[in-house]
Image (cartoon, coloured by chain):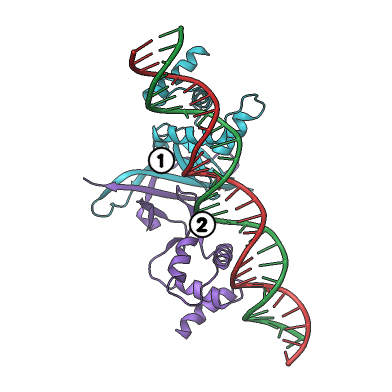
Chain colours: A cyan, B purple, C red, D green
Amino acid sequence: MISKNKTFIEKLRSSGLRPTRQRVEISKFLFNRKKTFHFSVDDLNKLLNSRKKKKISIATLYNTVHALKSAGHLKEFSLENNISYYDTNTTSHHHFYFNGKLTDIKNKEIHFKKIPTPPIGKKIKNVEVVIKLENIN
Amino acid sequence: MISKNKTFIEKLRSSGLRPTRQRVEISKFLFNRKKTFHFSVDDLNKLLNSRKKKKISIATLYNTVHALKSAGHLKEFSLENNISYYDTNTTSHHHFYFNGKLTDIKNKEIHFKKIPTPPIGKKIKNVEVVIKLENIN
DNA sequence: AGTTACTTTAGAATAATTATAAACTAATTA
DNA sequence: TAATTAGTTTATAATTATTCTAAAGTAACT
C-alpha cells in the first residue's frame, strides 16, 4: 500500500500537483484499477465519502478532478443529462452506450473503410465512435 | 408565407401538438432551412427574441423544444459544457466537431471495415461518429 | 357563444458547477 | 527544526441551465 501511494505521489508531483492527502486518496481510487472507470463528481462523492469519517469536500472533488483533467489524466465527456463525466482512459477510443452508461471499445476493434476529408485548413485530431445498444427481446 | 405556415401547422397537428402562434413561429425558424441546424435553448432565445416586440417566453421555448423532441422532430445531444443542444436532423448521422460546434456528415460518407459485436442480449441501435478537427499549421 | 382542455407565462424551485475567502498544510528557507 | 510562503482545502455563497407551479390565455369542440 505504501508503495502504491508512492506511485500516485509521483504521478501528482510530475504533473505539478502537490500530493495532498485528498489528491492521493482520489488518485488511488481512480487509477488503481484494471478497467477504465467512467464517473461523475457526484459518483465520486458517493463512492469515496460514504462510510468514511474524514470526508473530502465536494469543492475539493471538483478541484481535483479539474486538476487531473488539465494534467491529462482524465478525459471529460457529457451524456444527455448535462452532467460532466470523466473517463480514466485518456487515449482516443470508442464506446458502447446503453442505459446511460458507457463501456470502452478498444481502438483496434473498429476500422474504417471510408472517412470524409476534413474541411480546408483543418485536419483530423481524432475519431471517436459511439455505438448505441438496445435489448434484443 | 401563408402556405409555409400551413406546412408547419400540419406538421404540428399531425404530431398531436396544437399549432399555437409560438409553436408555428419556432417551427418555421427551426425547420425552414436548407442545412440542418444545431442549437441550444439559449441560442434559440437570442436568435428568435432579440429585436422583437412580442417575445416568446423561455418556458415556452423549453416546452416547445421538448415537445418537438418527443414528437421526433429534434434530436438532443450534449457537448462538454453541460448544455442541451438540439439537432434538426433526427436521422442517425455523423459530425465534425471543431471549436464547440458540430457540422453534419452524411451517413454514406463513412463506412466501416470492422465493428465489434455487441454484448450478449444486445443489438446495435445506431453508430455515430464524431471527428474532432484541429487547425493545420 | 360557451365550455373544456391544452398552452403560455412569470416567477419560484432545483441541481450541477463555480467562485470566494478564511483556515490549513506542504514545501522551502533560514 | 522553526519560520515563511505558496499552494490547498473547505464551507458557504453565487451562478446558471433547467424544471416546476399555478394563474391567465387561447385553440378547439359542442
Q: Is residue A10 visible?
A: yes
Identified by mark 2, the residue type is Glu
Residue B120, quarter of picture:
top right
Q: Is residue A92 left or right of residue B7?
A: left
Residue pictured at 48% horizontal, 85% vertical: B2
Label at residue B76? 2
* Both labels 2 and 1 in a single chain: no
Residue pictured at 48% horizontal, 23% vertical: A20
Q: Which residue is mark 1?
A: A110
Q: Is residue A15 left or right of residue A82?
A: left
In the image, residue A131 above or below residue A31: below
The residue closer to the viewer here, B120 or A85, is A85
Question: Would you say the residues marked 2 and 1 are in contact, meaning their CB atoms lie under 8 Å apart?
Answer: no
Identified by mark 1, the residue type is Ile
Q: Secondary structure at mark 2?
A: strand
Residue B36, image x, y percentages? 41, 64
Label at residue A69? none
Q: Is residue B90 visible?
A: no
In the image, residue B2 above or below residue A86: below
Residue B56, image x, y percentages? 53, 71
Q: Secondary structure at mark 1?
A: loop
In the image, residue C23 above or below residue A79: above
Q: In front: mark 2 or mark 1? A: 2
Residue B13, image x, y percentages? 59, 76
The chain identifier of the residue carrying mark 1 reads: A
